[in-house]
């Protein structure tokens, strides 16, 4: 027992004690025109873009032939993907297709371009489209919770296709998760899980926001007679 305690203490001492901290964004005057729900949607979208960039990096590391199709280095290819995620115009190699149509093309056996970039950019475009095609949200903007929910299901489908679809030679379109006798790499699954979780939470939050607004209106009508001021003289 004493030896076990010493071993456990040694393991604990090797574990990192600092794992980062929560940080807010710098104040922007545009926030004065945004509600808490607007900020939640914006922050979730930014977090999903960070996850997609991380996935792009992971996919390029496992599929170096993809970035070599268009760039001199993996870093240069990543920089182009990051630029495309923030751009309003369509990404040329996707032949003008958007959201789920772009995803279908990126995951088709006939696509010959940089499949990593195509897949990540199509995922991002699907998410942006579900938000009404907007990247910033203000008081008068509304988000359809069902569209956000559908985007989460589309991400699940995209992940399943990524893990299962093969090319004409029987090889995976892109190498991602790996489970072997010696190695277990499910980092792609975990990162996609974060994206799906954020989308589901946002859909639930927006649904509750609209539901509570309706309930609040009815409560106001019902309680108006009770809360009416009485004459004091």
Image (tube, helix red, strand yellow):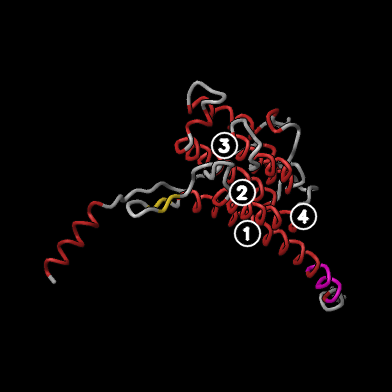
Q: Main secondary structure of the magenta part?
A: helix
Q: Earlier in the sequence, mark 2 or mark 1?
A: 2
Q: What stretch is highlighted in magenta?
A: 216-222
Place of residue 66 in the rendered image (x, y in percent of width and height, measured from the top left): 53, 31
Residue highlighted by disc 4: 144
Secondary element under disc 2, as helix, strand or loop, is helix
Structural distance between the alpha carbons of marks 4 and 3: 29 Å
Residue highlighted by disc 3: 116
Asked if disc 4 and disc 1 are in contact, CB closer than 8 Å, the reply is no
Q: Can residue 137 be seen here?
A: no
Say which of 174 and 119 sits in front: 174
Asked if residue 64 lies left or right of residue 129, the reply is left
Write the residue at 43% across / 47% down. Answer: 21
- Nearest-to-viewer mark from 1 and 3: 3
Residue 202 inside the magenta-drawn segment = no
Residue highlighted by disc 1: 201
Residue highlighted by disc 2: 44
Crowdedness near tag 2: few (<14), some (14–19) or many (≥20) residues, C-alpha within 10 Å: some
Asked if disc 2 and disc 1 are in contact, CB closer than 8 Å, the reply is yes
Structural distance between the alpha carbons of marks 2 and 3: 22 Å
Q: Which residue lies furthest to the top in this view?
A: 72
Asked if residue 140 lies left or right of residue 43, the reply is right
Asked if disc 2 and disc 3 are in contact, CB closer than 8 Å, the reply is no
């Amino acid at each position: 027992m004493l030896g076990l305690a010493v071993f456990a203490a040694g393991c604990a001492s090797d574990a990192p004690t600092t794992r980062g901290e929560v940080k807010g964004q710098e104040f922007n005057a545009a926030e004065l025109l945004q509600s808490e729900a607007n900020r939640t949607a914006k922050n979730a979208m930014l977090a999903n873009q960070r996850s997609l960039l991380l996935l792009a990096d992971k996919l390029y590391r496992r599929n170096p032939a993809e970035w070599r199709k268009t760039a001199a280095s993996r870093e240069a290819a990543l920089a182009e993907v990051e630029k495309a995620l923030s751009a309003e115009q369509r990404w040329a190699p996707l032949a003008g297709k958007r959201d789920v149509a772009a995803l279908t093309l990126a995951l088709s056996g006939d696509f010959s371009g940089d499949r990593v970039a195509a897949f990540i950019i199509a995922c991002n475009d699907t998410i942006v489209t579900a938000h009404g095609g907007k990247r910033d949200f203000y008081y008068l903007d509304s988000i359809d919770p069902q569209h956000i929910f559908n985007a989460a299901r589309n991400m699940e489908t995209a992940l399943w296709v990524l893990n299962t679809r093969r090319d004409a030679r029987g090889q995976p379109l892109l190498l991602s998760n790996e489970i072997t006798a010696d190695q277990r790499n499910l980092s792609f699954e975990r990162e996609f899980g974060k994206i799906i979780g954020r989308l589901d939470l946002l859909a639930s939050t927006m649904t509750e926001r609209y539901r509570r607004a309706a309930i609040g209106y009815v409560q106001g009508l019902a309680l108006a007679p009770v809360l009416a001021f009485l004459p004091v003289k």
